Amino acid sequence: MRYPKLRELREAVKALVKGPYTSDYPRKPHKAFERFRGRPYFHEEDCVGCTACAQVCPAKAIEYEDSVINGKGKRKLVVHWDICIFCGQCQANCITDKGIILSQEYDFSTTENREALSNEVEKELALCDCCGETIVPFDQYAWVAEKIGPMSFSNPALFLFYLRVLDLALKNEPARKDDLELRRPDRIKILCPRCRREAAVKS
């Protein structure tokens, strides 16, 4: 007859005293470990809309769409939890480190449609003063200017952006695309890369 080992007896007695190792789910909510990677959430105050998370997502669970309505640009970012593989690349590559953060939530049960399994954020886009094309979100402009400090005044787009935020500079209406002729003074404007190259060449 084979007798149980002392280690097995010790574990059995410990389980009788402290209770089972398994959690009492679903009667009691299970508490995930501290480093558990659950569903990611956008943090609107810290997200600058740079789309770095969408660029590095291997499952293509994060998508974005730029639109211009009534002269105002909007960028909409959406993370789809039903596609996400919770690898954490979005959080690891976020330029602000807090724009998108993985939570400890793991229960995705829902009676709603697929759209309920998503989280989204909207950011206002800066438009080119010449052609009206979208450039980057205003929050990203502000984040870059804050990171480089006084050196932002060496960039026409950055310091002009700050002057407009302080209502110290007028906002130019985008020129018509069929009547677009860039000159040297147009370099002191918020321009898209194409218009900035053209203005630099013609100056």
Image: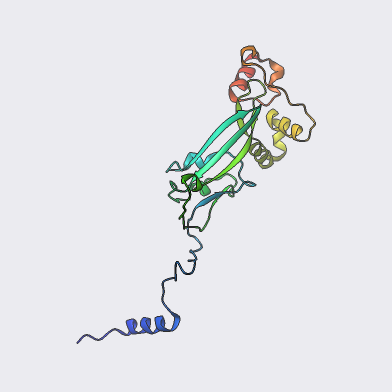
Residue 165, placed above or below residue 128 = below
Q: Position of residue 39 (x, y in %)?
A: 49, 53
Q: Quadrant of residue 59?
A: top left
Q: Quadrant of residue 131?
A: top right
| Quadrant of the drawing holding the N terminus | bottom left
> In the picture shown, does residue 1 fall above or below 187?
below
Q: Residue furthest left?
A: 1
Vertical placement of residue 67 versus 28, above or below: above
**At which x and y percent is residue 153?**
72, 33
Q: Position of residue 187 (x, y in %)?
A: 68, 21
Residue 78 left/right relative to 149: left
Residue shown at 53%/56% (left/top)? Answer: 103
Q: Which residue appears at 48% of the width and 49% of the height?
A: 112
Q: Residue at x 67, y 26 (%)?
A: 190
Residue at 60% across / 44% down in the picture?
A: 47
Is residue 66 found left or right of 161 in the rendered image?
Answer: left
70 or 189: nearer the viewer: 70
Rendered-image quadrant of the C terminus: top right
